[in-house]
Amino acid sequence: MEFLSDIASLINSTLRISTPLVFAAMAGIFAERSGVIDFSLEGKMLMAAFVAAVGSYFLGNPWLGLLLAIIACVSLSMLHGFASVTYKGDQVVSCVAINILIIGLTTALAAAWFGQAGLTPTLTEDQRFLEVNLPFAESLKDVPIIGTIYSDILSGHYIFVYLAYLSVPLVFWVVFKTSFGLRLRAVGENPSAVDTAGINVFAMRYKALAINGVLIAFAGAHLSTAVNANFFREMSAGRGYLALAAMIFGKWHPKTALVACLLFGFTDALQIRLQGVELPAIGEIPVQLIQAIPYVLTVVLLAGFVGKAIAPNAIGQPYIKER
Amino acid sequence: MVSPILELTNINKSFGHVHANKNINLTINKGTIHGIIGENGAGKSTLMSIVFGLYQANSGTIKVNGKEINLRSPKDSIINGIGMVHQHFMLVENFTVLENIILGFEGELVFGKNLEKAKKDLNDLCDTYKLNIDLNSTISDLSVGFRQRVEILKSLYRGAEILILDEPTGVLTPQEVDELFKILRSLKEEGKTIVLITHKLIEIMDLTSEVSVMRQGEMVGHTKTENTNKEQLAEMMVGRSVLLRLDKSEVKAGEVLFSVKNLTVKDDLDVTRVKNVDLEIRSGEILGLAGVTGNGQTELLEALSGIRKVESGEIYLEGKKVSDSQNFLDPRELKDKGLAHVPEDRQRMGLVTDFKAYENLIFGYHDQQPFSKSSVLNHRDIISHSKKIMEEYDVRPQSPNLITSNFSGGNQQKIILSRELNENPKVLLVGQPTRGVDIGAIEFIHQRLIDMRDRGTAILLVSVELDEVLSLSDRIVVMFDGKIVGEKENKNVTDRELGLLMAGVV
């Protein structure tokens, strides 16, 4: 029984930890499928976390914080588009600029407004998202198996967790079953084909980036107004890069990207669970070694499998119509 | 009876300093096949890209069916019944035929009913024009000829009444060209108007009823095809009279300078592409190697020039063994021994296109006197050498400091040729010397190759242009599926005969 509840809690935290990764990977799929590299998932996630926390603190409502975070992230996406789509700048440089800008900006603004470098005030319960208990979760709790799955694993998450996993089939549907998705995939593969079909290449890429901004905002808000009750310096902690790796590992495909996100989330959950645990024969594993697991896994997976992943053909190339 | 479907008046278009189209006037009649001929860079593709809405003209008017239209994007052109098959296909390679065709014309937000209707309409169109396309196949699995048909089908599905084809035969085999022409003729019979952009005179004479000639951004003449001939058109294109037939002296072949024994070569995917090939090239002769693209010519040429490893067999230069599977000379060492190589793909292997012309003019010889002394480049000598050689080989413009990619295809090719020929090689390997090169430059390049031969160089000419092989070579070998399937003295050989060998029939 002890073992079973261990497993349940491990799955439970995997779902929670993977959430920002899933949002970010889905955001990345939109940008990159349209042919625009997005290394700035990290910066945007951090920006969203900051704006959501600050917005919610001043306005007293986490939903308004989320809305502001969406506005902020879409703006950053547009900035990226302006530099790399309209002005055909180097997409990676534009992303790096955004990432660096946001680290400094969030720290500085927090210092200016709240007097603490990179820290915002703790949110009250009204100002943040709370765990959602699914209906009948309490009464089903003691039913074997079903109770464990429903009440212990599925119930009691923040709203973002549910939204993240709902977003995956939605993204799949949009990308593969709609005319917008067809154009999106085409513009990342061969923008000339899109242009000669009478579709505006630039408009398509901006639309994709706008969706990207909305999705990544959810990841940030999840960090600062749901699992935590404030923003702190560099709280995105590389999740944007990890999500990018998951997206590549998932071959720019929502379903496989989800699997990759869950895998990364699981190793993270596992490393938290393993800390301080004494293994038979080996003894206690140094915490640093355990903490390194997700990163080692990333490197191994990417080194081993990225060769088979084929990026959208036109990725990273600005569209130039006239010679 | 004859009514104009497309009228262009005073079209002008500049790209920076280049005036690509100057006051172009053009009238195209309904239901005709109208040829537009001109050398590379004459402005044909630019003009048609304007008609297709891809570029916007600086000035001028365009009328379709007598009504003036404003073309801001390809969408406007498509609405007005104009379709275009580009030289480089506008297809998404990992999409299916169906997905490529409906792109932009899906007719619904979520795929459903319209998709079924589109399939039916497309299958009807395929039947009408005998296109024989499977809508569910992925583009990357299709041959070039079929990809072109997909482009035609795409235009038809989008309601094209005027179909513009930009150099459609450049990438096709002779058989595929026949098929294409059949399709184009049946389109004409159904009342469609076809505009054929080409630099090949034979296609104009074969297919069109009217022809317009462009030169250096200007329209220099219109005529009915029946009232003109190849020589006259060539003269209009180039602006001077052109020799379409080469004057060539009798071959005076000397001793064997280059030979290949039982050569086998594999490609990067470990597939055997050259199978037990024997070749001998003598001093003072041109050996032509004919064959359809992809039958091992590329790998053979790469192995002979030292770029690719030999799997088995031997290569001899002046009777001395230079390469077998164990010991081989690299391209540099072969070069030092008097072997020059003009690669098939000039932009990938022959040039660094982002470099300046003078840099490309000395590549491979850059560490020799007088270009460099103790590893330091001697700028002044390089420039003066470049100027001299560019004049000698008529490279235009004559500016050593210009970035190589800004030269036309023909002039880029002249840059490579001048670099390689200037060293007076004993053996010269040339791949596709006139691919994408205009008539005037073709004449020049061919004459240079003949001159080299007359001076005693042994030349191997690899070309997919059968006309070129026939007009230059003294002896012709045909390659099919990695093997030499035939050898002929170039006397009374017909292209039919060679065509059968190339197709692997005999």
Image (spheres, grey):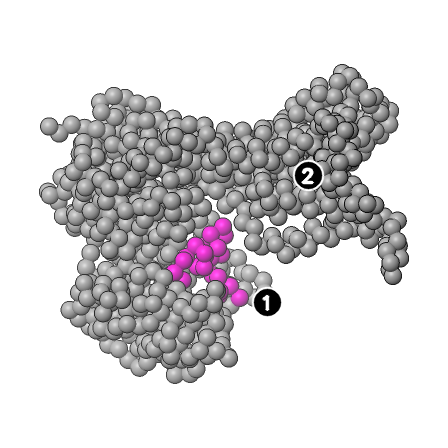
Any magenta on residue B353?
yes
Q: Position of residue A224 (x, y in %)?
A: 77, 29
Q: Nearer the viewer, residue B335 or B75?
A: B75
Do the residues bearing badges 1 and 2 touch, measured as CB atoms within 8 Å?
no
Q: Position of residue A199 (x, y in %)?
A: 43, 31
Magenta region = B343-367
Instruction: Write down the quadrant of residue A151 in the picture.
Output: top right
The residue positioned 58% from the left and 29% from the top of the image is A211
| B140 relative position to B376: left or right | left
Whether residue A93 is visible: no
Residue under label 1, please give it.
B374
Q: What is the count of numbered marks?
A: 2
What chain does badge 2 belong to? A
Instruction: Write down the quadrant of residue A266 in the picture.
Output: top right
Whether residue A73 is visible: yes
Instruction: Write down the quadrant of residue B347 in the picture.
Output: bottom left
Q: Position of residue A112 (x, y in %)?
A: 82, 23
Label 1's element? loop
| A86 relative position to A294: left or right | left
Picture layout, residue B198 above or below residue B256: above
The residue positioned 15% from the left and 27% from the top of the image is B3
Q: CA distance from mark 1 to mark 2?
A: 57 Å
Which numbered marker is on residue A21? 2
The residue positioned 17% from the left and 65% from the top of the image is B494
| B130 relative position to A253: left or right | left
- Rendered-image quadrant of the C terminus of chain A: top left
Q: Position of residue B363 (x, y in %)?
A: 48, 61
